[in-house]
Amino acid sequence: MRIRVFGHYVYASMAALALIEALVFFAAVYAAALVRFHGSLSFLADDQALEAALWPRALLFSAVMVLCLLAFGLYSARQRARLFGIALRLILAVLMAFVVASALFYLIPNLWIGRGVVGLATTGAFFGMLVSRSIFSRVVDENLLKRRVLVYGAGKSAAAIAGIRRRSDRRGFLVVGYVPAPGELREVTDGLLEPSEGLVRLCARLDASEVVVAMDDRRRGFPIAELLQCRLAGVDVTEQLSFLERETGRVRIDILNPAWMIFGQGFRRDPLRRLTGRLLDLGAGLGVLAVASPFMLASAIAIKLEEGWGAPVFYRQWRVGLLGRPFELLKFRSMRVDAESDGQAQWACKNDPRVTRVGAFIRKVRIDELPQLLNVLRGQMSLVGPRPERPEFVAELAERIPYYHERHSVKPGITGWAQLCYPYGSSEQDALEKLQYDLYYVKNNTLLFDLAILLQTAEVVFLGKGR
């Protein structure tokens, strides 16, 4: 089951785990203070109660821990790393949390608690997290947290639901059966139910909390009276496309229709959203630029040393931006100067032979993208958004892929939802898959979503995910 938080869907199981661990991290500060000061907490403040002295510190530490775990994908249902990868992410997240928490306690003198307490709290939080995750995975039955779904339809449209294979996409729901629609060519063979029983009775008998309408032809035999009875009985009724969007985090282009985009929720571009987005770009962009400037200088020197002092450091390339307007994108040059000597635009590919040794390294750790911060400050890009493509590729892809131009209704970004959810690709099929995630971002574009994407980008940067 997914729950809606600030306009976005979050898996109930992940939300429950995050809440449990937040309480563990909160308690770790109290335990660390007791251990560090041998059961005495009078050091905190004169004549202050224990709760009044410690709870702000514990709350800050708990929030930092949860955000760092989120940044490394440890609350993501799409996490596919194996045991070693999970262990590495846990260690990196805890180390980052220790550094960030220590810095915040130092910068906010009223909350200073001492390095010893922070160190003990971090250690306790790490082992508490291991215990809580172990118990959670053994005790909690995920099926209890899943939404029980009854699908109305058994044809091609319903097969799109039955065909969901990725465990991460099926984490939030459990299909209890398919009710064939009249006159429909059946493509779903498993889990068929007798339609004569009626949708309301089926929902009651199977304890279904949602009916997903997945008919191939709604003009014939649409059960409006039965669906109305379901709604009045407290059962949610959802259109198939909205259901797939919610559960998979993308917009299925193969069943997308303009009416859904016109009348559906989302796709908002109000002035307040544009203002908050621009403030985020300027504030975070300047902050990242200040922190990254030493790495950018080192990269420029390395490029010169490998390619010669006459070789250009930056690579300038025309890309398509907001509303289809072209702009000149800046990157550190990671390929040979003659990478496109014939003048023909070429897709970049994995293990591209045109990439230099320095280029391979800066691409792996994403340093080659840092000059795009200047594009962000100029207002040509945002920190978060669909990746900008070259005009030659856009013209070609727009002819073959429907709704491709709709991704240009927001500014392109350095990072984005598609980059987090889909691995690096360089083909037309990859562009189609990424477009589905881009349209999801365009539809659900909010400040909170941007912040969540920026947090999760840490996993991409530190662990080289995506290339």
Image (cartoon, grey):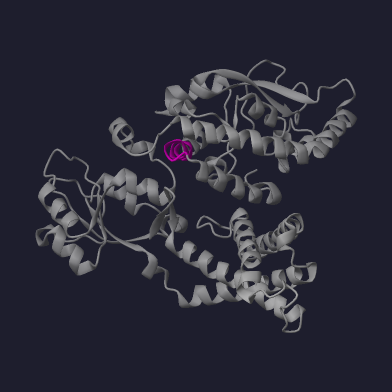
239 falls in the magenta region: no
> Residue extending furthest front?
47
For this rendering, which residue is in front, 95 or 184?
A: 95
- Residue 31 drawn above or below residue 162: below
Q: Residue at horizontal 31%, vertical 33%?
A: 257
- Tell me which secondary structure the magenta stretch mostly adopts: helix
Quadrant of the rendered image containing residue 112: bottom right
* Residue 217, quarter of the rendered image: top left
Give me the residue at 45% from left, 23% from top.
398
| Residue 349, visible in the rendered structure | no
Residue at image x 87%, y 32%? 301
Residue 281 in the image, given as x and y percentages of width and height: 61, 34
Q: Which residues are magenta?
A: 436-445
Left or right placement of residue 436 versus residue 385 in this view: left
Q: Nearer the viewer, residue 437 or 271?
A: 271
Q: Is residue 134 left or right of residue 111?
A: left
Does the rendering let one see residue 344? yes
- Across and down, in percent, residue 138 comes to 49, 77
Residue 339 spot, x, y in % from top left: 73, 24
Counting every numbered tag in the picture gives: 0
Q: Is residue 436 left or right of residue 147?
A: right
Name the quadrant of the C terminus: top right
**Hey, which quadrant is residue 315 in on the image?**
top right
Image spot of residue 90 (x, y percent): 66, 63
Q: Quadrant of the N terminus?
A: bottom left
Is 467 in front, or is 103? 103
